[in-house]
Amino acid sequence: MGMLKEEDKQYIREQFEGKLVGQVKILLFTQKLECEYCQPTEEILKELSELSELLTLDVHNLQIDSEDAKQYNIDKVPAIILLDEKDKDYGIRFFGIPSGYEFSSLLADIIDVSNGASDLAQELVAKIAGIQEPVDIKVFVTPTCPYCPGAVRAAHKIAIANPGMIKAQMIESTEFPHLANKYAVYGVPKTVINERVQFEGAMPDQAVVEQVLAAIQVTDS
Amino acid sequence: MEFSFSVSAPTKVDLAETYDLVIIGGGPTGLTAAIYASRAKLKTLVVEKGAPGGLVTTTEWIENYPGFPEGVAGPELGRAMQEQAQRFGTEIFKGQPENINLTSNPKEMTLGGKKVTVRAVIIATGTKPRKLNIPGEAELSGRGVSYCATCDGPFFAGKELVAVGAGNSGVQESIFLLKYATRITIVEYLPTIQAEKILVERFNSTGKGSFLLNHEVLSIEGSDKVTGVKVRDRVSGAETLIPCAGVFVWIGLVPQTDEFKDILKLDKWGYVEVDSELRTNIEGVWAAGDVISGATRQIAAAVGSGVTAAMSVEHKLSQQS
């Protein structure tokens, strides 16, 4: 018995059939020991990648493939990265299993990467595309939080608009308690931008874009 | 370990330029209205900013919705309703509508940067949790003050909590939080417990919870995170500090009508005033579910309200075409 229900597989197949354009490579970084969620993450991604011919799954080991890990800035597992057919990295990161509501974030991200664009409004894309310095967005979530995919997707869509500069991470709080502690996360979603600007709750895309722009100004001054 | 995977529709829908009906809010009301409208062959779009089901998704387990003798998980019910609506052709847009013009004809709004026009609108935005409005609440929100047990419960494993409000939500969600927390004190302003007896019995049987009735919450204490709650005995006037790592607030709900307050007629609490067919004061705009004045704010009632609104919309639009 797989992790996805047969009816869900069918639904995803139909979604992918209608909406995927180009290939998407799912990179998974994992390790054998001391990683409770690595194995189930690999299983769910394996099932998912079988639902479209345009999807491939590439599993790397954090220790053995340390050069790759370094290239993509991966320091904890499980970690998921989405690349397009030309190996373009859109800055999307999932740290921790994308289960519960976050699975729908992953599905939407795959469709966006396949299309090379999201539904972020054009005027916001223009603002984000103009950013010329590195931006790091961390979004802390729990899988049972219905508001969290809103925050994750906003961050990921912003990364897609300027992948050279912006990295946006989903962080599953219960798997990385040391990070939840470090960033004083007691409520989700919580977004931290460039270690300086932070806010709780899911906000409309425009408000998140404004926070990103504010974070750059803070960093500059 | 058991995992669930929500496969709700990805956001990328190719929006049409025009719809017969846009329903703002994808909770039980909006999704039920969508099922009826789609079956009546109205081109229907539901706009939902969060997960399918709205506030229902923050309820771990629902036992008073008919048809589920063992109860049903909130997210599961929301998702099933959304799937049912989609099966009949309803489109779902995830996000928030902007530049809403309800008074123009046709009505207009912007969705993800795209302008759409629409013949009829149902406001089914529902409610959000009411805040205490006491010192410390806003400052410590997300730092131990929470309104969503399913979201934030895991952060309080092995900790002691205070819940405010002994209604159904307060008691039910406290039972859920005891999966994580070691102890919960439910503080209630009134001298009596409002929750259903079956829930109170279940809460008491955990042996890890207690009620503090007839107490007013004065402030939430802590500098960078919650360390306690200050309460006052409404009889003796004595003030006490209850040490805790988190405070969950369930003191009722407020309508999500802020963006319509200049256009729609609202009652003094901010709920939308409607007639028996759920029409608002604006032609072509209906309101249904928890957001309307006098609603009982129960899922079963919300569902019925969605039906009434959809049938009224259908009747009206069939006269026009």
Image: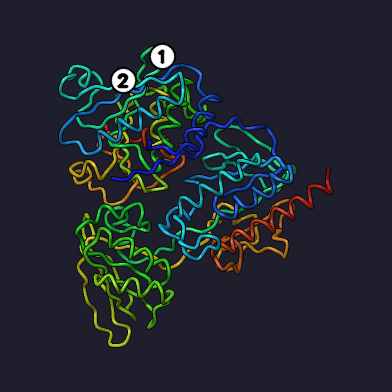
Which secondary structure, mark 1? loop
Circle 2 residues within 10 Å: few <14, some 14–19, many ≥20: some
Residue B2 seen: yes
Q: Amino acid at mark 2?
A: Asp
Q: Quadrant of residue B290?
A: bottom right
B227 or B136, nearer to the observer: B227
Answer with mark 1 or mark 2, whichever residue precedes in sequence.
2
State which quadrant residue A94 falls in.
Answer: top left
**Residue B124 % position (x, y):** 59, 54
Q: Nearer the viewer, residue A207 or B96?
A: B96
* Residue ID for mark 2: A58
Q: Is residue A38 left or right of residue B280?
A: left
Q: Secondary structure at mark 2?
A: strand
* Closer to the camera in the image, B163 or B61: B61
Relative to A108, is B65 above or below?
below
Residue drawn at x 65%, y 64% as measured from the top left: B273
Q: Are marks 1 and 2 in contact (CB under 8 Å)?
A: no
Q: Residue A157: give x, y in percent of width and height.
A: 43, 30
Q: Can you say which quadrant of the picture contains the C terminus of chain B?
A: top right
Question: What is the chain letter for disc 1?
Answer: A
Could you tell me which residue is drawn at 46 percent across and 57 percent down?
A: B72
Q: Disc 1 versus disc 2: distance between alpha carbons?
A: 13 Å
List x then y, in percent, for residue A28: 29, 25
Numbered mark located on residue A85 in the image: 1
Crowding near pointer 1: few (<14 within 10 Å), some, many (20+)? some
At label 1, which amino acid type do we have? Glu
In the image, residue A20 sits, relative to residue B307, either above or below, namely above
